[in-house]
Image: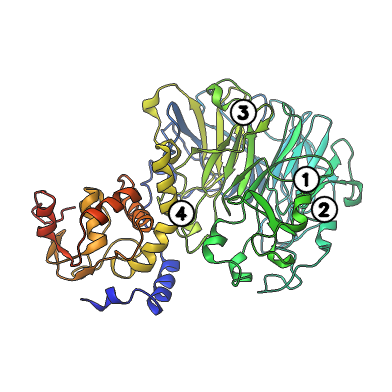
Amino acid sequence: MNPCHALLRGAIVVAVTSLFYGCGSADQPTAPANPANAPADPTTTPAVTTQPSELQLPPGFEALVVFEGTGEAREIYIREDGDLFVSLAGIRDGNHILGLRDADGDFIIDQVEPFYHLTTPDAQREPQVHIEYLDDYLYAVENLQLVRMHLPPGQLAPSSDVEIVVDNIPYQSSHRARTLSVDPQGWLYVNIGAPSNACQADAKTKGSPGLDPCPQLESYAGIWRWRSDILNQSREDGEPFAGGIRNAVAQTWDTVYDGLYVGQMGRDRLDSLWPERFDSGQNAELPAEEFFRVEQGQNFGWPYCYYDYLQKKKVLAPEYGGDGRIVGRCEDYSGPQATFPGHYSPASIAFYHQDQFPAHYRGGAFVALKGSWNRAPLPQDGYIVAFVPFADGAATGDWEVFADGFKGFKTLYERGNAVYRPQSVAVHPDGALYILDNKKGRIWRVTYTGDDGNAGDVTNNQPDDDRKLMVAASEGKGVEIYMTYCAACHQPQGGGVPGEFPPLAGSEWVAADKGRLIRTVLHGMRGPIERQGQRYDEIMPGHAFLNDKDVAALLTFIRSSFSNAAEPVHDSEVLLIRTGDARESPWDAAELEGRLGLTPSPQNSGD
């Protein structure tokens, strides 16, 4: 037996984990559908042609790419006349906002007008501009200021000077993005994120307690509002609207429900700051990202509390004596209407009150979740547009995947490797949903055609039991088990080692007969076996010490990763083979094929 198989615990786990952090993804990215995936020249308008997109949508929907080339983008706003406005983190021709127009009615953007030049107080970081529109004015909020520009319908760029509405908004480098919404009465609502992760006495320091009371709540971590019709206001002219909100990049005022809705990004580093209370798996899933309706005067509990969506309650943060279960003072704070898994990063909310989409979507909210960065050692996740259904004027508490396929990988370990990240959503007056990517500035237009054959599958459309297995395997236990027991030999990306350990990527042995694969993992297998012209003579030991659920999670992960796309494995199938076909010695390939009545391929296992 090669010593690789014997080193399953202890030091090898550390080595594998280091390798795991350094790898890209366990799958190859989706091939670019067209040349528009190439890096954009920020000084020119790219030639974009109508094309099917790579997005995976529910049956009956289709998405078309209508523009690409804004560069790093932050928000999309669609005016009643159909013109689009996109705010940027970077610049284009020295400006931070683009006016975009489809001049000939084919849905493709063919007119671009950059405007709004500003400077940033932080030479190391670009400003993050967010926009809103009210009464022929485009409002823009950035790191320090809230301004407006006269921009009546028909104009793509303002012809008058920029007017300052609010000056000297408190600035900090952490959570510096100011986001903006407006109500029909002319109030401007501005998110001012917390300047820290958890208001510790010593920021980001292991075991450091939280400041109590937290002084940051006086000027940060909440929603403030100012009047839109008064110029040259100060920070003090605004009024606090709601507090205890760590960072609400996603926010919108919905006129139908007559209320402010936000998506809070939850805290980080539960495991690294409090390792005696939380492990990496808990940190990957917690705390929840929260979807609120915000009423004036409410407090949502940051930094003292966070929401545990598994327990469905707010619990006390460890900086304030919490252990993951204690509720304490958290029962006094307002809760969410819906929650998403940890670190999914809600970035934008758009309510759907049009009738182009089926009735199921009317009255609900689309949420752009731009994806995680700190779920290691689990894969990064999010990178979707979710849909939150509403009933009787309130969120039902459920949510579903509406658009997937942005990250370009089935399994993604590093945020930077994602092909796209959905940053913003907006509804066009004609009922189409527009989605903005923040890496390349790609814009998709999503419509309902009623033709189920035009839409790709999304994970949420699989049968419920299978979907849960897929999610559990690819986001949780399956990848952990693979990295602990399999990756040292078969490699984190499933490529194997030529002549020593066969590849799992694109493998018929992996993707075909489930019984054969379960027996291989439970009982082990010895060579010789040929794969892709390579002979392998090593012995794979059995892993019957894993319980049925763990074996099912592991095999589901393998069968849905590494360019494999096979059905999940159920723990009941593992139990059936474990109890009905007990064995203590490893199979060889020919014996296993014969045991199952299968005809060996010319290369034994085949690919």
Q: Residues within 10 Å of mark 3 (few under 14, many from 20)?
A: many
Of 396 and 372, which appears nearest the observer?
396
Question: The disc labelled 1 sits on which kind of residue?
Answer: Val
Of 236 and 229, which appears nearest the observer?
236
Q: Residues within 10 Å of mark 2 (few under 14, many from 20)?
A: many
Question: Which residue is label 2 attached to?
Answer: 169
- Mark closer to the chain start, 1 or 2: 2
Question: The disc labelled 2 sits on which kind of residue?
Answer: Ile
Question: Marks 2 and 4: in contact by CB < 8 Å?
Answer: no
Q: Which mark's residue is nearer the viewer, 4 or 2?
A: 4
> Residue 455 at x, y = what percent?
40, 31
Q: Residues within 10 Å of mark 1 (few under 14, many from 20)?
A: many
Question: Marks 4 and 3: in contact by CB < 8 Å?
Answer: no
Of 179 and 145, which appears nearest the observer?
179
**CA distance separating discs 2 and 3:** 32 Å
- Mark closer to the chain start, 1 or 4: 1
Question: Marks 2 and 1: in contact by CB < 8 Å?
Answer: yes
User: With respect to residue 356, does 461 lie above or below?
Assistant: below
Question: Which residue is label 3 attached to?
Answer: 352
Please name the residue shown 40% across and 47% down the image. 470
Helix or strand or loop: what does disc 2 sit on?
A: loop
Helix or strand or loop: what does disc 3 sit on?
A: loop
> Residue 23 at x, y = what percent?
41, 65
Q: Which mark's residue is nearer the viewer, 1 or 4?
A: 4
Question: The disc labelled 4 sits on which kind of residue?
Answer: Glu
Question: Which residue is label 1 attached to?
Answer: 190
Helix or strand or loop: what does disc 4 sit on?
A: helix
User: With respect to residue 357, does 561 lie above or below?
Assistant: below
Residue 555 in which image quadrant: bottom left
**CA distance separating discs 3 and 4:** 30 Å
Which mark identifies residue 475?
Answer: 4
- Mark closer to the chain start, 2 or 3: 2
